[in-house]
Amino acid sequence: MDSTVASLNRVLISRSALENNFLLCRKVAGDALLMPMIKANGYGHGMCECARVFAAAGARCFGVAEVAEAVALRQAGFEQKILVFAGMLPDFYSAILEFDLTPVFVDGSQLDSFARYAAAEDRVVAVHLKMDVGMGRQGFPPCDLPKIVSLVDRFDSLELQGIMAHFPMADDKDNSINRTIITRFTEAVAPFENRNIYLHLSNSCALFYFSEARFNMVRPGIALYGYGVDLSESQYKLLPAMSFVSRVIQVREVEKGKKLGYGHSFVTKRKTRLALIPVGYEDGYLRKLSNKGFVLLKGKRAPVVGRVSMNLIIVDVTDILGVRLGDEAVLMGRQGEEKIDADEIAGWLGTISYEVLCLFGHCNSKEYID
Ligand SMILES: *Cc1c(COP(=O)(O)O)cnc(C)c1O
């Protein structure tokens, strides 16, 4: 017999939220070309599914980290321009050409060998160059830009298509480092502005906060998934695209003084009703959430009590009437008037929404809704 049974734990991705966020980013981007960053499997949301939504909404290019991701997009049929931001090694030269990918070079060390490779294949490849104007991670210093551009110009097999850099803390809107970053970038690219190339600096926060950093291309990631940008003082709204739901698999009542779960890390202070939910650290609901997290049941918050196990959590539902076997439990998302979002969970875990989305998205099978 051919039957499949789905997990009780479901990560749901709202296509309409992704589309809403894409359209909002594009509106804010104005004339700048919007390049959705869909690396890390679309920040856990599913790279190809996200690409499909963004393409349908008008995306003309995509940004990924690795060549393998770009190849997967091509194999899924995407014909848009794909920039590959990390992991450019000679191993990938043939894939760059075969799949018509756009490499980002972070210094001049590989330009020569790549240019010769492309020339031998009788190809002209568009390349982007990445400066470090203050991120302090990857790239070359702005003072090297003229030298590296002239290196690119020396090869008929290379065409300079873009110059970029990355913000280290655009989320800290008022930090003066952001001005410095913008100024350094603007000054470095000034001699090349008359060329018909893409200049790009802005991630999500910079796109929304610094209009002078948009140039003619922007690279939002997290905003497309509904997070990362503080829009509390704006008329705009980003919609979280991911939710994480499960079901109640047992309801039981225990006495005051009952020690709960591995390590007996929680002792009931009253007669307590407990609900069990089949989610655990294996599903990305990390052990650090023991005695810390909350889950929505019947539109109300139920605290996680005791340790998070590999496949189980216990929540206290004493104060929530009528919780029953099979009820929907929302680990992240909305239920009734209540919500738990990735920022709140990130707060419990001491991390950022990005990591929570990747974690839940990577650990669970995804369903696309709306
Ligand atoms: C991931 C990434 C982005 C997107 O950053 P967000 O903060 O998610 O908007 C932009 N540029 C580069 C180079 C990246 O790697």
Image (cartoon, rainbow, N blue to C red):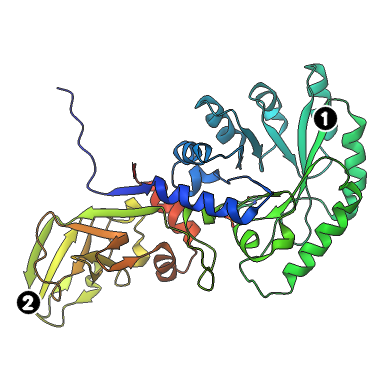
- Residue at 66%, 43% in the rendered image: 86
In the rendered image, which quarter contains the N terminus?
top left
Label 2 CB sits under 8 Å from any ligand 1 atom:
no
Q: Is residue 307 left or right of residue 276?
A: right
- Which numbered mark, 2 or 1, is in the foreground of this view? 1
- Observer-nearest of 251 and 216: 216
Residue 36, relative to residue 97: is it above or below? below
Label 1 CB sits under 8 Å from any ligand 1 atom:
no
Q: Is residue 66 left or right of residue 367?
A: right
Residue 110 visible here = no
Residue indicated by mark 2: 255
Residue 152 visible here = yes
Q: Quadrant of residue 214?
A: bottom right
Residue 249 rendering spot, x and y as whole percentages: 14, 55
Residue 308 rendering spot, x and y as whole percentages: 28, 62
Q: Quadrant of residue 96?
A: top right
Residue 96, relative to residue 109: is it above or below? above
Residue 232 rendering spot, x and y as whole percentages: 50, 72
Q: Is residue 287 left or right of residue 182?
A: left
Q: Residues within 10 Å of mark 1 (few under 14, many from 20)?
A: many
- Observer-nearest of 122 and 237: 237
CA–CA distance in space, label 2 to label 1: 73 Å
Q: Quadrant of residue 67?
A: top right
Q: Which mark is residue 158?
A: 1
Looking at the rendered structure, the kind of residue marked 2 is Glu
Looking at the rendered structure, the kind of residue marked 1 is Leu
